[in-house]
Image (cartoon, rainbow, N blue to C red):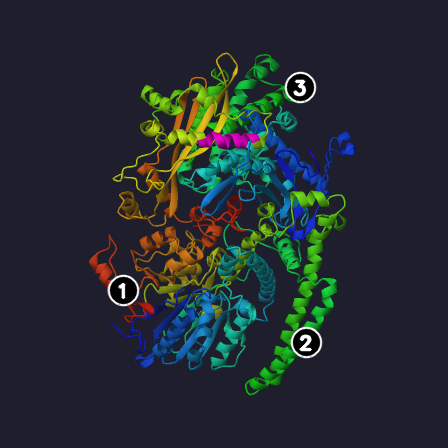
Amino acid sequence: MRRRSNLRLIPPKDGVTVRMYNTGFGDCFLLAFPAENDSARYVLIDCGVHHQFSGGSERMKLITEDIAKATGNNLQIVAVTHEHTDHITGFRYGDSAFKEIEIGELWLAWTEDPSNTLAKKLRDIHGQRIRALQAAVARLKETGSPLAYRLEGVLNFDLNSDTGMLKGNKGIFEFLRSCSQKNPERPEDYRTPGEPPLEIQGVKGVKCYVLGPPQDKVLIEKSSDKSETYSEFKALNEETAFMAAVMAASGSSGKTDEKADMEAEKAADGKVADEKASEEANKKADKNTNEEADKDVDEEANEEANEEEDDESYAELFRRSCPFDERLMMPKEAAISDSVFGEFFREHYGFGDDKDDSQRWRRIEEDWLSSASKLALNINSATNNTSLVLAFELTYTVPSKVLLFAADAQVGNWSYWQKLAWPKEGEKDGRVDSSADSKVDSKVTGKDLLKRTVLYKVGHHGSLNATLREKGLEMMDSRELVAMIPVDEVWARTKQNWDHPAAVLLKRLGEKSRGRVIRSDRIPEDGHMAKPDGVSDAEWNAFLENLDWDRSSQRLWIQYTVR
Amino acid sequence: MTIGPVDSCLEVVDFDPASLAFYAPVDLNDPRLLAQDGLSPSEGNPQFHQQMVYAVAKTTIGHFEFALGRKTLWSAHRTKDKGKYHSEFVDRLRIYPHAMREANAYYSPERKALLFGYFPASATESGQNMPGEMVFTCLSHDIIAHETTHSLIDGLHPRFIEPSNEDVLALHEAIADIVALFQHFAYPDVLKHQIARTKGDLESQNLLGELAYQFGQATQCYGALRSAIGEIDKDTKKWVPKQPDPTELLRTKEPHDRGAILVGAVFDAFLAIYKARIRDLLRIASNGTGIFPPGELHPDLVERLAQEASKTAEHVLHMCIRALDYCPPVDISFGDYLRALITADMELVTDDRHNYRLAVIEAFRRRGIYPQDIRNLSTESLMWHVPTPDEQEKFKKIFKSPSSLQSLMPDWGMESDRRKVFEKSEEGRRKLHGWFRGSDAKDAVSAARILLDEKKDSHYRSVCRDEDGIPRLEIHSLRPARRIGPGGQTVIELVVEITQRRRGYLDAELQEKVDKGEIDPPPDPDFIMRGGCTLLIDPGTADVRYCVYKDITSSNRLDKMRKFLNSGAGPALNMTYFGDARREHFKRWMSGDSDRGVGMEPFALLHRNNSHEEEI
């Protein structure tokens, strides 16, 4: 059953086909479910390539064209798991293809919901951290430190894009909404773990459970069992003290003499923004009511007010974060020219910018910025933990099989699934089914879903901290287990120095899945996939029966059908 | 000493780049300060901080100089200019008491400086601190001693920051913790309170262990200090010593955790020695019964016990430092360190009256630390290899006469000028290099497992060679070591370290091809494997008394190193993203880029990693 990539993707009547695109380094999964009259319904989970991956945008264009053809320009559901570039850039790079695609529903994590208070709080902290990190990266770049590039890679936001990080993503959501049939900005787009299982319109026997992100600030911060959690931004702690210093050093804390200029600039910006906003509002007038447009303007104004407020609180925070009384602090100029201590500082620290300055190699102007790696890891983990995690249950199989899409979830997100439970259908309405078996198995739990997983989209490109052991992989008991890893190991190791995929995890995945580990960077070149040792021919052939991949030179995708 | 403080080997420069501020240096010669014995403790006064880091660092240096019997040198500043390496003398270790805003402190081998961080205590983990209250790592005795020790070890063994096996960095951490702990214990006053508290229960090991635990607890950063010896039981809330598990070492990979096992072993040895030393005191104080009446101990007894404990701590501390002179120059393992400990102690104290060595061997054995290649764990078999008569003959050819050897010796006592010692030692190294490359030495060097073959059909073409195809060698170190002669007199021995290097490839097949000379010129290596030896020579007779070698041709060691570097980036989150520090090390070393740039500090990463451990 070989299909060419330019044809529609039609799953068999008794199966679900999961197509993993090889975007380079990033996630893009197309799920095809059988529907009435031999037709199919499609779910797209993420569409991205890491912004530092060279040639990524060209490749994403090819991929999105393939998506358009495979689905006949019709996506029932587009799920965007989180805002890292390696999950979303495809929507931008492939916008010409997406413009032609009808989108039924958008599924986004509740953390994207503007009306959710906790989500807003998380976004605020997030924005402040990002700004501080941006400032640190800018300073590190000036010194030529290799750390700057690394930090940008870890951060995984396109800091250089014109739109700026957060607005850029918002733009992507707005763009997707404009492709969607329904009105934009609908509260029902936002998915919350534990909510009643979702259904895909026109598809029978499939339920989708939302497992993450956890509605718990502490868990979102949790990248690993032992890492710390951080409190409010305005509270003074290790992280905020560092952030305040970075902002002060980059001069954005609003020193008194610059303040007037800055305010003038802001005012000018504000005008432009107002004009832009009203233009956009006019454009949207056919779709939106004027009220909603006003709301947009308000929002932008709010954001600016927030930034200004941030600057002030940063300045205040910086004052509080200095370890000694202001009178004891000597600025550089004062230290150089001090009548008593100037000589000491000139001799033992040295200030010359000359390369041959014998003191230069011992100076520490920038060394403290390396603490930014801690900050970057915290931001990264927090973002990964906001991943929308979906489990599709095929209820027509016994026991029902589960396809688990873990996005980039880390420890905090994973551990939350253990506690989740859904009442059996009917119970939620208070109508308890009286048949015997419903009493034995009266609810579906997060643990059940893990146990019955037959297809596991490996978390976070196979990094060690994104697949839990005892509360994760070891629970997946199915003899049919197949693992799919979207990764480019060579790029990750040579360009970024990342341990993706981690050898230990890869080994265990191989053992648990009896060799059925499908990798986007290992799409077979020569028409066959070698059988691992210790697996019978019959078992391996059965696996190959359900496996297919793009035979064109592009090797755009590899897919597996769960029956 | 001048303001800073600055003296002949230390300089405190108080620049706080994150706060954009310099702080005025303290003048310890100020008559007002002299009169009151320095500034009194004050967290809000940066000058007190300067005085504190200076005083503790100075004490640590003092312990090293006492134990080694000579002035310590900092590792040289290495630069690469037009393809050639230069070593520059570094007169002073720089100390920055407020270098960053992070719960971290580290020694920077690149800047020859100690960088201490500060941070506001967080609301959730403030412990004894008030939330938001500033915590200064430069005010912690243990952190200062720990970091200073890193710099002192680096001065002695610059290759010990090279991650060639899983023990090397762990040993760096462990010794830094051992020095911090026992330097702290060497103050009797610290111990008195704890000893008095235990009343009659002196046999219990817990009292000193608990104290060590408390030190570790206070300094947050040091996992090894905290977990090595014991932990607070979750249910009873009481401190319980950790039961040694000989298999733990096999399972433990992370440098701090491995280091903790070594610290635990040394601490066990300390307790055994202490208990043996106070046995008579306890008998006297309890009228021979060994049983004490309930109630307070007699203050005189507390005083004497504290003295014994601090004396024992000091002995163990100096024993551990002295062992550093008896280590191989590269690729050290815990087992090697045990052998160095035993050999060094044997040299200094032939008569083991208090059974120190037995206590050490027993404690190491219980933690599963022993060398792979010896028959049993007796003192005799743990001693380093004594050259056979045949080997001795060969060494004679190289070192010629006692008088020529003596001419190499730098005058390197406690009173010497550091720069002169450095220069003299450089000169000696050049001379010695000539001897090793002389015609007499050609066959003789085999005694030191040095490879000098010039044959084209050599099996070791990956060994780095000069233009003539002869393997390069480096006289890595030349220094005096002190021991006590049979008559009680101090005898100075000469320590000579020789190293060679070899191109290492992660691909074993490629390695073999390069070794057979099938690929010429060889491709850029993935790592550098080093070999060489440490020779302990009696300058009076020109006899080599011990030879410690790491064979450059060892395929076993090469395989192990490859396996180690291939074993993945380890569990830390930092490594998942910021790369495998082990391989990074070799990349940077080979690029010869001395200005590694911000963010590449080996000890900063090592310390930071500790706080990000993963589940799988």
- Residue B358 seen from this side: no
Foreground: disc 3 or disc 2: 2
Magenta stretch, overall SS: helix
Q: Which range of residues does the magenta coloring cover?
A: B420-430
- Residue at point 47% right, 16% down? B350
Residue B358 x, y percent position in the rendering:
45, 21
Query: Mark 1 falls on what kind of element?
Result: loop
| Picture layout, residue B68 above or below residue B287 | below
Tag of residue B46: none
- The chain letter for the residue carrying disc 3 is B
Which residue was labeled with disc 2?
A268
Image-based side of B597 in relation to A333, left or right: left
C-alpha span from label 1 to label 3: 83 Å
Q: Nearer the viewer, residue A349 or A438?
A: A349
Give the chain of mark 2. A
A456 left or right, relative to B294: left
